[in-house]
Image (cartoon, coloured by chain):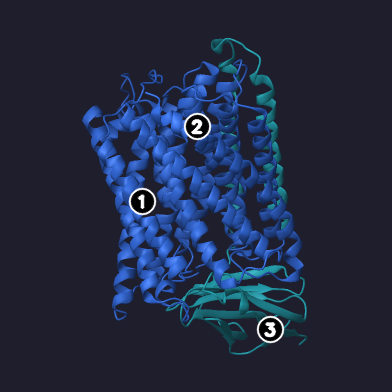
Chain colours: A blue, B cyan
Amino acid sequence: MTTTNEPAVRLDLDAKRVVLGYVAVSALVLALMMVLGLLMRLAQGEALAIPPDLTYQIMTIHGIGMVGIAGFSGAAIMWYFANQHLQLTLGVFQANFVIFLLGVVAILMSVFLGGFAGGWTFLYPLPAHSGGVWEKGAATAYLFGLLLIGVGFLLLYLDVARAVIEKYGSLAKGLGWPQLFAGDEGEAPPPVVVACTVVLIINTLSIVCGAAIVLMCLINIIEPAFAINPLLAKNLIYVFGHVFINAAIYMAVVAIYEILPRHTGRPWKTTRVLLGAWTATGVMVVLVYPHHLLMDFVMPVWMLAMGQIISYCSGLPVLLVTAWGALANIYRSGMRWNMTSGFLILAVFGWSAGVLPAIVDGTIVVNYVMHNTMWVPGHFHFYLLLGLVPMIFAFMYFLVGSEGVRSETNIDKLAFWAFVVGALGFVMMFLYSGLQSVPRRWAVHFPEWLAYDQIASVFAALAVAGVLVFMVRFLAGVPRLYAAD
Amino acid sequence: MQELAWLISLALIIVCAAVFLAVILKAGTEAKEQDIQGGPYRYRRPSFWALVGIGVLTAIVSLSDLPYAAQGASSKASQVVEATGYQWYWTLSRDEVSVGEPVEFRVTSADVNHGFGIYDESLRLLAQTQAMPGYTNRLRFTFQKPGKYRILCLEYCGLGHHEMPAEISVVAR
């Protein structure tokens, strides 16, 4: 029971233009958010004088901006490849684009006009309880912006669900369950469809949880007598946040399944191991969220122990299926190296290596002395900056390269290595700061910690320089890509 | 514990990088897929079981002594500190405790979520729990050395998040 990726089908011009719009916005926002991240590290290192209130506003925008653009760009990658197997609705894809931008405008206004600095996780009751810093209107605009973005994504997933059911008969068949569980020897869906089906199920759940708590917070802001249980709020927020950001990776990972085989000549097959791994991932990503609450001692202990155990288990599909599959795919393949394939392999490495310190932190006794230190941004920047982000850059270079718009130069290669060295140094400094117990999300650091921040800033600047090159090179090719039929 | 976490993570990352490098260096040479596919996948099943074994052992050892014991315990510690987080300061029912005897910190918040982190004089994090409105987290900790310890906030709570250190003295009995 194996299937292979079907040959690529060219998108029609309108669809291609919308994908280009998604990727162009992603490139711009990614670069801008990275510059904001660099500013934050410079401020913490006292290399740049930024007042703490502005630093916390930047922190809020950096967090929500990165999570949002991760989902947005992941959706573009997923849609581009899924559209070659499923009859997706272009209008829904366009609607998500417009709704996302409206949500972004609301959030930008809340932060930079209203002074909202509640952190991207908007932990209840902080949005309504700013300590006299921002008005309720600012918190309302932020939450409303989030709600808008969630609605856009929900529409997108409903359309993908419709398309999967239309082609395969049910979501279970989209997951390949007949082949996985019932011994069906027939053809299973291609990896991209399996990934899409898992993502649409888990992210629909996450967005519904997110929308529920956002709505409750909005009502609480308008009518404070409507109080929410803070522990329930925290659980709902972390179900939403954890699943959403992981789903962004799962959407973008489609780029590896679809593009890598074009460089090795070896198709990525749908096997029972792959089907089992995706089903297991879908279950685990939802159940694992209590590992964000390990320091909430009032939580049921069995949930916290489950958080640790599933954290361990969730590393297995990443390491033994995606990473192993990618390495087996390129091993002695006569690999055609270029920017696209370089980024794809970097992405698999970043994702695989990044989950390791995350799993270590998922151990309760480690979390006891590591939670909310710099260790946490250390591990999530590892698999996002060196995992998810390279998947997006790979897709950018793939789009440009596949259309023959522009050839790669030494500047691209130089920027690639600047990014690799900068990003790796940057995340290792985060982890090292975690070892030194430096708290995360502090605008002002003790003198003992400044050297770590300053070294991290140098690495961050190197990574940002690389990203600016990728962004400019991609955007410069967009007009020709836009016109090319 | 921090050093152990760092060393294990570093070792695992280096092993991961070494495997990637070894394969990348072989990626340029060409062999027929059917000639080598058995190779890479031959080791996957044993690797799976090896990782499961390591995971089970680590889980058994690490889950045997959790920091949640005080939460449901009926026995009272000889020293109790009621700690409440506010935007942006802590109130402690006492700011001096004895060395070598368990202290039970009953941690809550009067407004938003805070994090109660106990730091020693070298700014090393020793223990923590969350401070949440409407709930009391019980953190039991025994100080091993006399001295001045700092309480730092470890959950983002607004613009004064970094400005609310408190101090607790640990004295000889």
Instruction: Residue under label 3, please give it.
Output: B168
Instruction: Residue under label 1, please give it.
Output: A100
Instruction: Residue under label 2, please give it.
Output: A477
A357 or A350: nearer the viewer = A350
**Mark 3, other Cα within 10 Å: few <14 / some 14–19 / many ≥20:** some
In the rendered image, which quarter contains the N terminus of chain A?
top left
Picture quarter containing residue A43? bottom right
Tell me whether the residue at label 2 lies in contact with that at label 1, contact meaning CB atoms closer than 8 angstroms.
no
Chain for mark 3? B
Q: Could you tell me if residue B52 is visible in this image?
A: no
Q: Which of marks 2 and 1 is in front?
A: 2
Question: How far apart in space, not on screen, are marks 3 and 1 (Cα)?
Answer: 48 Å
Question: How far apart in space, not on screen, are marks 3 and 2 (Cα)?
Answer: 60 Å
Q: Is residue A73 left or right of residue B164?
A: left
B27 or B97: nearer the viewer = B27
Residue sitting at 67 percent across and 54 percent down?
A431
Q: Which element carries disc 1, helix, strand or loop?
A: helix
Q: Residue at the far bottom: name it.
A: B94
Chain for mark 2? A
Picture quarter containing residue B64? bottom right
Q: Where is residue A234 in the image (x, y as percent from the top left)?
A: 42, 65
**Mark 2, other Cα within 10 Å: few <14 / some 14–19 / many ≥20:** some
Residue sitting at 57 percent across and 74 percent down?
B161
Q: In this view, does A385 lie above or below A393?
A: below
Q: Could you tell me if residue A124 is visible in this image?
A: yes
Question: Identity of the amino acid at label 2?
Answer: Gly
Question: Identity of the amino acid at label 3?
Answer: Ile
Q: Position of residue A112 (x, y in %)?
A: 47, 66
